[in-house]
Image: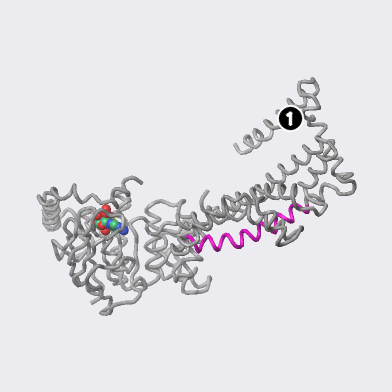
């Protein structure tokens, strides 16, 4: 069953790629509109072997981008989860913070770039801050809703079984909110990754980064390199999500 | 005296309620150490509320609850509560559910597992120690819930329709089992049930609550030797008496005229969910 589903998930996209290639070869999709998969793969190889700009290879771009996301994401998780639990636990804190959260949340992380550069200059700190903003709200909001949805009867049960407030926090609210926290982490990471690339587009100029790489490809008018870069971003994002899912499946064995 | 309730009343005053809901009215009741007492009454008459107040999970509007002669600051530390819905922690295995209370007291893992395994054996749940709650049957779950409560050695055990959701065979099995444990441990038990037979089969004393606001409308000592034969004539006599009481609650003229008015927001919302 699972094997059949995996096959399905693999074969259909591969089939589409073959179709795309066919259309390119037959001239239905001219190269000036979109490069063919084979060209994109060749471009990918070029990015890996020669780099863009020359010498800055794809793996370095990836590494830098991942580092930025890792910093922003870790920071967002280590602030968002505890704060979310606190907000979920205490109605007072929730009432106080909700208007602030809901005002800051609709501001696109990219709108913070000028301030970020003003405060932190151009560099890792700035990028971390922007990504932090992208990751933070989904993590926070999902954690809050996870805690709020923990059944009161479980809290009462813990209390009559002798748990202190601190223990209820640790042994009931936290595990009870875990499924929602994981959802938040996954959404947060996805948004963080999207924010990263966009942030590299505009602001962050360290010479490395997938967004930066794509902008360079655009400047030298190489759509095949642009698409190769996009494919790498997409696949890396997918991979990141798979990794979090793996942790999630391990932590939530009790649910399945 | 293990438990003394004096002039206890409870009115829910919710912000979103159309009007205050009187749930309990002037309950006075005392339960001896080691006594098995059942509370029976129509649905919504405040039985769960009564237990929650005793456990300190809800504040009384008036009256006092004394546990072992004192007014406890943290009542939940003196009582064990077995909930209507099992209330097991779904993310904990059976053994970790049972050992929860011990863990909260910082007992070492080895020690608490040893003790929890004893309870598993005693409760007939050995072999399921490492299952998650969703993997075991309802009857098993309720055994786990009872074991989890008793391992803490509470003075008073409050049980809120613990067998309500079980099929009749599992139910009667667990009734017999509960009697054995009770007789062995000599705990004070306050047991809530909808089932007349269950109340008579288990308890030394039966309290009948009236329609909401619940007040004591029946106080019936059950003088039958254990184990009880549910087909006996004496058993039937008790049955008749309780049925008469409960029927009177249903046919209460005053109730039926009031009933439509006292559909509260709370119930309305609950019905919608
Ligand atoms: N938190 C609450 N806010 C408002 N009303 C409540 C609340 N809890 C209970 N009530 C109301 O108080 C009354 C008694 O509720 P309770 O749950 O104690 O009844 P019960 O006898 O246990 O019912 P059942 O037999 O259905 O379990 C009900 O009418 C209920 O709607
Ligand atoms: Mg109830």
Residue sitting at the far bottom: B70
* Residue B161 visible (yes or no): no
Q: Is residue B223 left or right of residue B76?
A: left
The N terminus of chain B - image quarter: bottom left
Q: Secondary structure at mark 1?
A: helix
> Can you tell which quarter of the image residue A12 is in?
top right
Q: Position of residue A217 (x, y in %)?
A: 82, 40
Quadrant location of ligand 1? bottom left
Residue occupying the point 42% across, 56% down: A151
Residue to which mark 1 is pinned: A17
Q: Is residue A142 left or right of residue A123?
A: left
Residue occupying the point 83% across, 32% down: A39
| B143 vs B64, nearest the viewer | B64
* Residue A125 visible (yes or no): yes
Residue occupying the point 48% across, 61% down: A173
The majority secondary structure of the magenta stretch comes to helix
Q: Is residue A80 magenta?
A: yes
Q: Position of residue A57 (x, y in %)?
A: 85, 48
| B136 vs A81, nearest the viewer | A81
> Can you tell which quarter of the image residue A7 is in?
top right
Q: Position of residue B211 (x, y in %)?
A: 17, 55
How many other residues sit within 10 Å of disc 1, few (<14), some (14-19) or many (≥20)? some
**Numbered disc 1: what chain?**
A
Residue occupying the point 33% across, 70% down: B79
> Can you tell which quarter of the image residue B203 is in?
bottom left
Q: Coloured how?
A: one colour
- In the rendered image, the vertical position of residue A244 relative to residue B33, given as above or below: above
Q: Is residue B259 magenta?
A: no
| B214 vs B181, nearest the viewer | B214
Magenta residues, as a range?
A63-88
């Amino acid at each position: 069953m699972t094997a059949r589903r995996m096959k399905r998930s693999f074969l259909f996209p591969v089939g589409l790629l073959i179709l795309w290639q066919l259309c390119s070869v037959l001239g239905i999709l001219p190269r000036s509109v979109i490069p063919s998969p084979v060209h994109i793969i060749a471009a990918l190889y070029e990015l890996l072997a020669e780099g863009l700009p020359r010498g800055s290879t794809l793996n370095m771009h990836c590494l830098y981008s991942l580092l930025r996301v890792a910093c922003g994401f870790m920071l967002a998780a280590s602030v968002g989860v505890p704060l979310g639990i606190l907000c979920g636990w205490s109605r007072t804190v929730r009432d106080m913070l909700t208007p602030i959260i809901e005002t800051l949340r609709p501001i696109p992380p990219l709108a913070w770039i000028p301030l970020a550069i003003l405060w932190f200059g151009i560099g890792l700190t700035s990028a971390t801050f922007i990504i932090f903003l992208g990751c933070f709200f989904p993590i926070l909001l999902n954690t809050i809703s996870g805690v709020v949805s923990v059944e009161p009867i479980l809290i009462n049960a813990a209390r009559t079984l002798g748990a202190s407030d601190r223990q209820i926090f640790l042994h009931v609210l936290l595990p009870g909110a875990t499924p929602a926290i994981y959802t938040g982490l996954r959404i947060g990471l996805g948004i963080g990754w999207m924010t990263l690339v966009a942030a590299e587009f505009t602001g962050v100029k360290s010479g490395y980064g997938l967004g930066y790489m794509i902008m360079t490809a655009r400047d030298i008018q190489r759509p095949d390199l642009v698409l190769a870069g996009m494919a790498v971003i997409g696949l890396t994002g997918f991979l990141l999500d798979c990794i979090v899912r793996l942790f999630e499946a391990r932590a939530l064995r009790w649910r399945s | 005296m293990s438990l003394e309730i004096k002039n206890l009343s409870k009115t829910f005053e919710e912000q979103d309620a159309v009007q205050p809901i009187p749930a309990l009215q002037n309950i006075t009741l005392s339960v001896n150490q080691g006594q098995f007492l059942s509370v029976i009454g129509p649905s919504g008459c405040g039985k769960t509320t009564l237990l929650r107040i005793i456990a300190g999970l809800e504040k009384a509007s008036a009256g006092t609850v004394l546990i072992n002669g004192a007014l406890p600051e943290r009542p939940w530390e003196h009582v064990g509560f077995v909930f209507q819905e099992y209330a097991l922690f779904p993310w904990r295995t059976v053994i970790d559910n049972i050992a929860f209370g011990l863990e909260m007291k910082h007992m070492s893992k080895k020690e608490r597992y040893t003790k929890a395994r004893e309870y598993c054996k005693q409760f007939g749940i050995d072999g399921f120690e490492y299952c998650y709650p969703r993997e075991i049957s309802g009857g098993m779950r309720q055994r786990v819930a009872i074991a989890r409560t008793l391992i803490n050695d509470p003075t008073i055990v409050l049980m809120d329709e613990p067998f309500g959701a079980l099929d009749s065979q599992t139910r009667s099995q667990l009734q017999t089992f509960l009697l054995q444990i009770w007789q062995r441990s000599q705990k004070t038990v306050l047991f809530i049930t909808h089932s007349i037979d269950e109340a008579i089969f288990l308890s030394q004393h039966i309290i009948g609550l009236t329609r909401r606001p619940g007040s004591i409308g029946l106080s019936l000592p059950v003088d039958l030797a254990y184990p009880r034969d549910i087909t006996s004539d004496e058993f039937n006599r008790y049955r008749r008496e309780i049925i008469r009481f409960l029927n009177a609650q249903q046919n209460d003229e005053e109730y039926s005229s009031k009933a439509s008015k006292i559909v509260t927001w709370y119930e309305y919302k609950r019905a919608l969910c």
